[in-house]
Image (cartoon, helix red, strand yellow):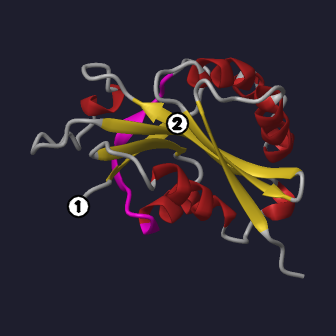
Amino acid sequence: MTRVIDLRHYGQGSLPEGFKQMLIDVHADAYADAMDDDFNQRFPWFVDHWSGMDGFTCVVAFDGDEPTGFAYGAPLQPGREWWRSTTFAPNNGYTATYAVSEVMVRPQWRKQGISERLHEALLKERGEDLAVLLVDVTHPKVQGLYETWGYEKAGEQQPFADSPVYAVMVKRLHP
């Protein structure tokens, strides 16, 4: 059976009642096997942090009324682009960066191309020069997927003492 997946766009200031809890619930399902990890348990803090950032945008995929996944992020403030300390630091006119904080799909809806649709919809109208995201280095298949979407590994970072080490992935949005 082919499902029709509806993508809905949200932005800072237009978040409906229960929006943050919906993201937390999708995350809990997507990471059900890793929710005993302290870092994953802090996801509600990350939702509050990112949704409060200037320029926050989110795309949520729905199967009927059921949220199946989401992608969200926000533009990074000039001078606070944490990824520029990596080996890939283009200075050839590439200035503005959009940080893709999360792309996740619940297990029941994986392997249907939803994550790519979410990612594309999130970045489609962006005016920034670059997109950046982090991928756990213990997930090379996920890193490989992002490479097929045009990302390059720029280095590695561990942003929090209890977080995994991440590959920093950068993509030019306007080649």
Q: Above or below — where is 32 with respect to 21? A: below
Q: Is residue 112 above or below residue 14?
A: below
Horizontally, residue 63 falls left or right of residue 119, namely: right
Which residue is tagged 2? 73
Question: What is the distance, in whole Å, between disc 1 and disc 2 at their CAs?
Answer: 21 Å
Q: How many circles with numbers are drawn on the protein?
A: 2
Q: Quadrant of residue 31?
A: top right
Q: Check residue 151 for magenta coloring.
A: yes
| Horizontal arrangement in the rendering, residue 173 relative to residue 100 (left or right) | left
Is residue 170 visible in the rendered structure shown here? yes
Which three-letter amino acid code belongs to the residue tagged 2? Answer: Gly
The image shows residue 144 at horizontal and vertical percentages of 49, 64
Q: Residues within 10 Å of mark 1 (few under 14, many from 20)?
A: few
> Circle 2 — which element?
strand
Q: Secondary structure at mark 1?
A: loop
Q: Residue at x 45, y 56 (%)?
A: 124
What's the amino acid at mark 1? Pro
Residue placed farthest to the left in the image?
92
Magenta range is: 148-159
Q: Which residue is mark 1?
A: 175
- Whether residue 168 is visible to the viewer of this picture, yes or no, is no
Give the residue displayed 51% in from the left and 59% down from the top: 120
Decide if residue 64 is on the left or right side of residue 61: right
For the point 52% across and 64% down, the residue is 145
Quadrant placement of the C terminus: bottom left
Residue 135: image location, x then y, percent = 52, 45
